[in-house]
Image (cartoon, rainbow, N blue to C red):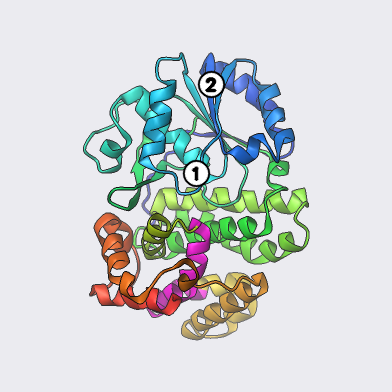
Amino acid sequence: MSLKFNWITPTKIYFGQGSINKLGDEASKLGSKALIITSKGWTTKRRIFFDELAKNLTIKYEIYDEVKTNPTTNVVDKIVSHFEGKGVDLVIGFGGGSSIDVAKAVALIIASGGSSKEYLFKIKEPKDSLPIIAIPTTHGTGSEVDKYAVLTDPETHAKAPIISTLIYPKVTIVEPKFATTIPQLLTISTTIDALSHALESYISRHANIFSRMYAREAIHIIYNYLPKVIKDPSNIEIRGKLLWSSLCAGIAIDQSRAGLLHALEHPLSSYYNIHHGLGLYILFIPWLEYTLDYGVREFAEIARLINPKLYEVEDYRAAKEFLNITKKFFQQLEIKVKLSDYGVREEDLPTLANNAVKYLKPLVENNPRKPSSIDELINIYRKAL
C-alpha cells in the first residue's frame, strides 16, 4: 500500500435528515432551469418524495422519468436530443445509480457535444459539462461522489464508464428518508454493490492509505447493518448508515477503482439485463475464492475489522475466516440465485469472459490475482452457474 495519493473532491455534500431543504439555494446558484433525471417509480409509487424535491426547487425545471436499470447509450442520446436547446443549464440526478449516471452523461454531452458512444469508447475528449446535483436514493453505487458514468452500448454489449473529472457532481444531497421505501431485493443488491466497491478498492493494486480508510468504514457498516435493515426497512437511522457506507465506497473506488468482480459482472448486465448488484452477489463468492490467496494480508485485515478476535491468529487463517464470514453473511440475506436462473449457459461463458477483458481490462488487471488465461475467468463464471 502506498502512502502517496492524489485526491480531488469538488463535490459539496449535504448529508442527513432535512438535507433536501438545501436544494433550492444550491440549484439557484448553479442554474436557472434544471433537467431532473429519474425513474418512473419516483413519479408514481413514491410521489411524496419526488414532490418534496420539486417543491424545494425555486428555478424552472423539466423532467425525464424513464430511466431503467443498466441504462444505454441510446437512452442518453435520446435525452440529449430532446432537451438540447431548451435552456437547461443544470442537471439533477434523483434516484439510484442509473439515474445519476445518466444525469452525468447527459450533462457532459449537452455541454461538450457529440454522442455518448464517442465518450464511452474514448473517441472524443470531453471539454465541458453542465453542473450536476446528485440526490441518491439507494445505498449502492457511490456515483454521487465519483467521476464515473456507467453506460451500456447495446450494439457491442460494452458496459463501461465514461470517466471525467468534469462530471463530479457540484452538490450531493443525501436525505436518508428517501431510501426507506426501497424494496428488500433492491436493498440487498444495491448494498452488495457498495460492499463490492469497498472490498475491491481495498485490495486494489492502486489502493492507498486514503482509499482504504474509506473502504474500511464502508465494509464495517455493511456487515453490521445490512441484516438489520432487512428486519427494519423503514428505519431512517439505519438507512442513513448504509447511505454513508455507499458514499464512502464511492470515494474509495474514485481513488483506487473497482476490480475483477466488477469487470466480470458488467457483461452479465449487458447481455442479460441482470441488476448490477444482483450480478455481483452471484459472482461474489467465486471471485473471493479465486482471489483470496493473492491478498492474504488485506483480507486478514478486513476479517479482523469484522471480528477483532481474529487478531489472535495468523494472517492466512484470518483471511480464510473472512471467506467463511462472508458466506454466512450472504446466507443471512436468504437470496438463492445463480446465473442459470437468468438464462446464462455454459456455452455463453467464453463470450462473457472475452467481453470483460476487451472492455474492462483495467479492472481485470486491478485485481491482486491477474488471470493468466481466459479459462480462469470462465471458471469463475462456471462456479456461479
Of 172 and 114, nearer the camera is 114
- Residue under numbered circle 2: 34
Q: Position of residue 373 (x, y in %)?
A: 23, 74
**Mark 2 closeness class: few <14, some 14–19, many ≥20 residues within 10 Å:** many
The image quadrant that residue 15 belongs to is: top right
Say which element carries label 1.
helix
Residue at point 68% right, 54% down? 183
Q: Is residue 63 left or right of residue 128?
A: right
Return the disc, 1 or 2, that comes first in the chain's sequence: 2
Q: Is residue 114 left or right of residue 148?
A: left
For residue 374, side relative to residue 96 (left or right): left
Residue 119 relative to residue 149: left or right:
left
Magenta-highlighted residues? 275-300
The residues tagged by marks 1 and 2 sit, at their Cα atoms, a distance apart of: 18 Å
In the picture, the disc for residue 285 is none
Q: Is residue 304 visible?
A: yes
10 Å crowding of disc 1: few (<14), some (14-19), many (20+): many
Which of the two residues, 219 or 134, is positioned nearer the viewer here?
A: 134
Give residue 118's quadrant in the image: top left
Residue at image mark 1: 98
Residue at x 29% of width, y 27% of height: 127
Residue drawn at 63 percent across, 49 percent down: 243
